[in-house]
Amino acid sequence: MNIAVLIKMVPDTESKLEVNDGALNDQNFKYMVNPYDEFAVEQAVQFKEAEGGKVTLLSLFSEDNSIDTDLRKMLAIGADEIVVLRQEGYRGDKPLANAKALSDAIKELDVDLVLCGIQGIDYYQAATGTMVAQMLGMPNISGVTSLEYNSGTLKAKRQIEGGLQTVETSTPAVITCQKDMNKVRFPALKDIMMSKRKPFENKNVDSIDSNDAVTSKSSLPPARDGGEMIDGENAEDKVNKLIEKLKMEAKVI
């Protein structure tokens, strides 16, 4: 069973967010593997361990090599190889263009299954995986929380409003993974050392024109107003004044 896992590199949650004149300044961002994609890697490795085959990680990013260390951590989990598509001017908020580049690369691989996270935690568009499925002509199940494989058939469960939905499809297929799918393993030191010997391929790809929506302006959340201190002779007096303000000024009671 040969599996491709799509990996998106997203800004580390500790990166400093700066906006200058309505434009996001990402020059000093550090990047990490999108957490939803980690669940996809873990699921792929579990299938490989049960069925045999190979797990190929596929990522699209700029020419910045600072991401290589974090990508190799996914090899330590149990994936077999990485292919990084290096694209000048890459942007994470262009799902249509990015899906085209990724689907073209997948066509060169002989895969039975494509896994990825349901969305990136940078732009929360939840679009790329489904677009890849459309471009490859494969069935797609999104937001999967449990996935089973049996003789070419996938059985997926996904949360819907008020219940749990079970969906089946044949392979090849594209599955986008939710956070409750599994528990991502911590690699042993031996696996970390072995990951340095696994294939890591960089491929240059051209930028792709698309009609993706364009971010016109970025801004930080407005600063919150300071709180108001309520004076009083005692606790009861303060509570009465607070209730009065909630009634007359805030009008919430």
Image (cartoon, grey):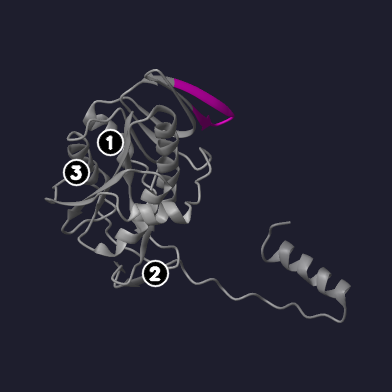
- Depth order, front residue of 104/239: 104
Question: Amino acid type of disc 2?
Answer: Leu
Q: Is residue 74 above or below residue 30?
A: above
Question: Amino acid type of disc 1?
Answer: Met
- Judge left or right: residue 232 versus residue 186: right
Going by the picture, which residue comes out furthest to the left?
Answer: 206
The residue stretch that appears in magenta = 157-167
Mark 1 lies on a secondary structure that is helix
Q: Nearer the viewer, mark 1 or mark 3?
A: 3
Q: CA distance from mark 2 to mark 3?
A: 28 Å
> Where does label 1 land, which residue?
131
Q: Quadrant of residue 231?
A: bottom right
Pointer 2: residues within 10 angstroms few (<14), some, or many (20+)? few
Mark 2 lies on a secondary structure that is loop
Question: Amino acid type of disc 3?
Answer: Ala
> Where does label 2 land, which residue?
17
Residue 78: in magenta span: no
Q: Is residue 170 above or below residue 244?
A: above
> Is residue 16 visible in the rendered structure shown here?
yes
Is label 2 in contact with label 3 (beta carbons under 8 Å)? no
Give whichever of discs 1 and 2 has the lower sequence position.
2
- Depth order, front residue of 206/252: 206
Where's residue 223, x and y in %? 49, 72
> Where does label 3 land, which residue?
101
Residue at the image position 23 percent from the left and 46 percent from the top: 98
Residue at the image position 33 percent from the left and 31 percent from the top: 53
Q: Main secondary structure of the magenta part?
A: strand
Q: Nearer the viewer, mark 2 or mark 3?
A: 3
